[in-house]
């Protein structure tokens, strides 16, 4: 069985560099136990737990462009085991990613879990869907979504792969930090209350 993500990523130019650097033999007979062309519950759970991702597109002139997308957890919807979608909102009116996708529908997503030092990379073919062209899709994607979307971006899975945690520096959101500090804050509040009570007892005893 071939290793789907590398089937896409490893081009003749990549193979040429591998050969020159003496590592081509590592990949000549590399095989995986999955095609990695369908999401399992593991990938689906990881995707819906993300509140941001990066998407890379390429212009017709060959220049890449990477954009950050963010929202509430689950804003990148898993429609089925080979389809994702998200609402595209009005931004700075440049429409670079949208324009790139109109000329070249191939894109790559990077989904990061910084605290757990985990990343999922996904090759997709993207389709821009007007809000009024698919009522069921629009309802599914815009459910509980804030603001007014301009369009839906539907992503057809080509292949995905998981990366190793090496060199991923752990980072935490404000909400995650607050959750971690909650027991400490609760303990401090209890100690402060006990301290206040003791001071009142001492003051009462000295009168």
Image: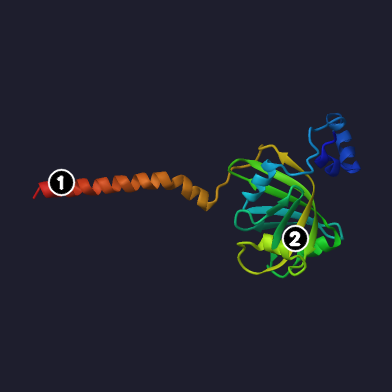
Name of the residue lying farthest toward the front: 136
Specify the quadrant of the image occupied by residue 161.
Answer: top right
Q: Residue at x 49, y 48 (%)?
A: 177
Residue that numbered label 2 is attached to: 153
The Cα–Cα distance between marks 1 and 2, rounded to whole angstroms, is: 67 Å
Vertical position of residue 100 compared to residue 111: above or below: below
Density class for disc 1 (Cα within 10 Å; few <14, some 14-19, many ≥20) is few
Vertical position of residue 57 compared to residue 134: above or below: above
Instruction: From the viewer's perspective, tell me whether residue 166 is left or right of residue 179.
Output: right
Between residues 176 and 65, which one lies in front from this camera angle?
Answer: 176
Instruction: From the viewer's perspective, tell me whether residue 54 is left or right of residue 14.
Output: left
Name of the residue lying farthest toward the left: 207
- Name the mark on residue 202: 1
Q: How is the image coloured?
A: rainbow
Instruction: From the viewer's perspective, tell me whether residue 153 is left or right of residue 29.
Output: left
Q: Residue at x 83, y 29 (%)?
A: 26
For the N terminus, which image quadrant? top right
Q: Residue at x 69, y 37 (%)?
A: 164
Density class for disc 2 (Cα within 10 Å; few <14, some 14-19, many ≥20) is many
């Amino acid at each position: 069985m071939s290793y789907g993500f590398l089937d896409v990523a490893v081009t003749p130019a990549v193979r040429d560099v591998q050969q020159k650097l003496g590592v081509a033999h590592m990949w000549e007979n590399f095989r995986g136990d999955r095609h990695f062309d369908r999401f399992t519950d593991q990938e689906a759970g990881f995707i819906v737990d993300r509140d941001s991702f990066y998407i890379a597109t390429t212009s017709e002139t060959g220049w890449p462009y990477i954009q950050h997308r963010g929202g509430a957890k689950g804003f990148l919807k898993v429609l089925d085991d080979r389809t994702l979608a998200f609402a595209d909102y009005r931004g700075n009116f440049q429409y670079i990613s949208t324009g790139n996708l109109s000329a070249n529908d191939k894109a790559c997503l990077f989904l990061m879990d910084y605290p757990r030092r985990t990343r999922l990379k996904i090759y997709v073919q993207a389709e821009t869907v007007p809000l009024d062209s698919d009522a069921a899709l629009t309802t599914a994607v815009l459910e509980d979504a804030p603001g007014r979307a301009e369009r839906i971006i539907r992503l057809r899975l080509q292949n995905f792969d998981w990366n190793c945690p090496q060199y991923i520096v752990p980072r935490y959101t404000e909400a995650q930090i607050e959750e971690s500090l909650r027991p400490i804050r609760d303990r401090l509040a209890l100690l402060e209350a006990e301290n206040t009570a003791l001071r009142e007892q001492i003051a009462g005893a000295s009168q």
